Amino acid sequence: MNSFTPVSSVGERELIRRLSRIFYQDSNRDVLIGPGKDDCAVLSAGDGECIVVTTDMLHRTTDFPQQMSGWQIGWMSAAVNLSDIAAMGANPCGILAAIGLQSDCDVGFVEEIARGLHACAASCGTSVIGGDIDTHDELTITGTAVGKVSEDRLLTRKGAKPGDMVCVTGYAGSAGAALYALENNIETSESLLKKLFEPIPRVRESLSLADSGAVTSMMDTSDGIAISLYDLADASDVGFIIYEDRLPLQDDLKQLIHEPERLLDYSLYSGGDFELLFTLSPEKVSDATKTCDFTIIGKVAEKDMGITLERPQANNLSISRKGYLQLKDTD
Amino acid sequence: MNSFTPVSSVGERELIRRLSRIFYQDSNRDVLIGPGKDDCAVLSAGDGECIVVTTDMLHRTTDFPQQMSGWQIGWMSAAVNLSDIAAMGANPCGILAAIGLQSDCDVGFVEEIARGLHACAASCGTSVIGGDIDTHDELTITGTAVGKVSEDRLLTRKGAKPGDMVCVTGYAGSAGAALYALENNIETSESLLKKLFEPIPRVRESLSLADSGAVTSMMDTSDGIAISLYDLADASDVGFIIYEDRLPLQDDLKQLIHEPERLLDYSLYSGGDFELLFTLSPEKVSDATKTCDFTIIGKVAEKDMGITLERPQANNLSISRKGYLQLKDTD
């Protein structure tokens, strides 16, 4: 007899693991990287070329705060997927958007969503190439992004080696702090809100970094830096030392949140920043620094070091395996 | 000042046209066929190779009758997308599934959905390569399928010429009639219900037909034969003559619905069959008939003929531009 187990008791990552086992019983010779392994699935396109593809379902109540405009909802729906394409070092070549709309929704609002989708795609040198329209009682957008990359330039979560530098683009914790401000009616800067509502997929940075040949592993920080470090650690079989005083915090964030411990929580454990987290060969760091802006926040260690935070004014601590996840907060 | 126009007053196809205009302001050199034009979007993969990609959002209340099992829900979610890949003459190389689940949903039920997705993918020689899990108040599945095809084998809606034969695989109207039986608590055969719950994507037939070199245009009949004929007619700039007595009707359908006019309505205007509708060069028909089973149901005419039904025991009539559509029944 089967027992009843609600998905909420299992957590998103465990559920993905279980489903990936079901999906993996066959041998699809096109697949280079399958479900649950990286930011995108990777298919062979022949001649050393790869197709990368990713999909993300977003909902009005859980993903689009009421303050977001239609344009921002569209932008976000494209951005979350383009960020995954960037995380593989790939060139985006198209986006699909399946949109579930309430039947009494204004056509003008839908067109605003479309303009936001288009603007984000265009900012990354691509466009919306297809989709689906459906009626639904809650606004739901599933974006899918497709990219191309040659196999020898593909960047994955696997490849970090002890001694490599750990780096991140942009700022940490901005989107999470902006959400906190919104939910608690605390006034904050436009700049911080923009980090939450209009995240910039780091496609340009990713392509430049791939050009440098310096990157040993990469993923995006959509669920927060901490959980992303664990994903890199699992895939690369390494540990990390992260320097607290190197975490890149936006001034507006420091004005919003003063307590050091809370600031640390936001920078490590809140999601929505869609920055690139990556590791660099130490001998090629200077090649990488010429290509785009990023911050070195730590170094790759042996696996048995775990994931440790070095603090200048406190004892070192172990970074927890937690972050922003659907279904359940931690696993 | 903007006026308020609910999407329900516009219709799915008009809305897709409006959004496609927004999506088309830029020039994405990778795109061979863009939004709203065919069963899939088509991207160039270089060296004469194409990537085809399609997405479809399905919901519990509108797309999965209560009688469907989890396995069938999964099968259906893969099938609707694989049917679009088949419609382009392409080889499927992977499926992604973004699944929105109620948080109190049983993990066993989700695993059944996954097994159905996997089984349908495997039946078409491919697999589920990725996806997303999300919480949602209504079960929602957005499937995405990716396929490959060389540019010279790509089958599109454009290319039918007067004199070509019009053909369809399988039966017409079975899924629509099964839905009618379900909704009205009329007992019907397992075979008819299976047409509704477990449609078979015609991937094998499509690849065989593409091999024959006989196909001049193709699409699937997901929204019904009538609306699909209009789509082919619009893309190819032709008309059609369809013979009523050639429409392939399943015996179980004729046992369920006796009145000839209603039988005709189901065979032309009901959706969910996911068969291939295609046109053949007359001189190559015999090459095509060797490859798989299908029925010749009419011929391609000049555009000014419109889309006409020839009836042996009644006056000819003009087939209407209507079918199974979300948001609004006709447009």
Image (spheres, coloured by chain):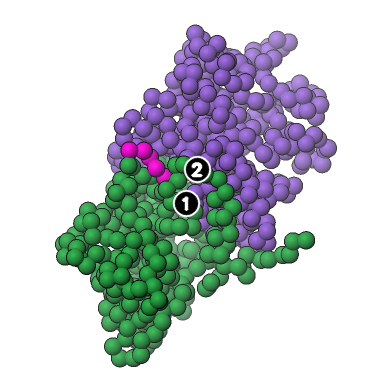
Chain colours: A green, B purple
Is residue A44 a member of the stretch shown in magenta? yes
Q: Is residue A195 left or right of residue A23?
A: left
Residue displayed at 35% across by 90% down? A315
Amino acid type indicated by mark 2: Asn
Is residue B206 a member of the stretch shown in magenta? no
Q: Is residue B132 left or right of residue A244?
A: right
Residue displayed at 60% across by 26% down? B225
Circles 2 and 1: CB atoms closer than 8 Å: yes
Secondary structure under tag 2 reads: loop
Residue displayed at 51% across by 27% down? B207
Secondary structure under tag 1 reads: loop
The answer to whether residue A118 is above or below residue B137 is: above
Where does the image place residue A219, in percent across and percent down from the top left?
36, 61
The answer to whether residue A56 is above or below residue B330 is: below
Query: In the figure, residue A244 lies in which quadrant?
Result: bottom left
Secondary structure mostly taken by the magenta-highlighted segment of the chain:
strand
User: Which one is nearer the viewer's eye here, A193 or B178?
Assistant: B178
Residue range corresponding to the magenta coloring: A43-47
Whether residue A49 is visible to the viewer of this picture, yes or no, is: yes
Residue at image mark 2: A28
Residue displayed at 26% across by 65% down? A280
Residue at image mark 1: A34
User: Which one is nearer the viewer's eye here, B30 or A111?
Assistant: B30
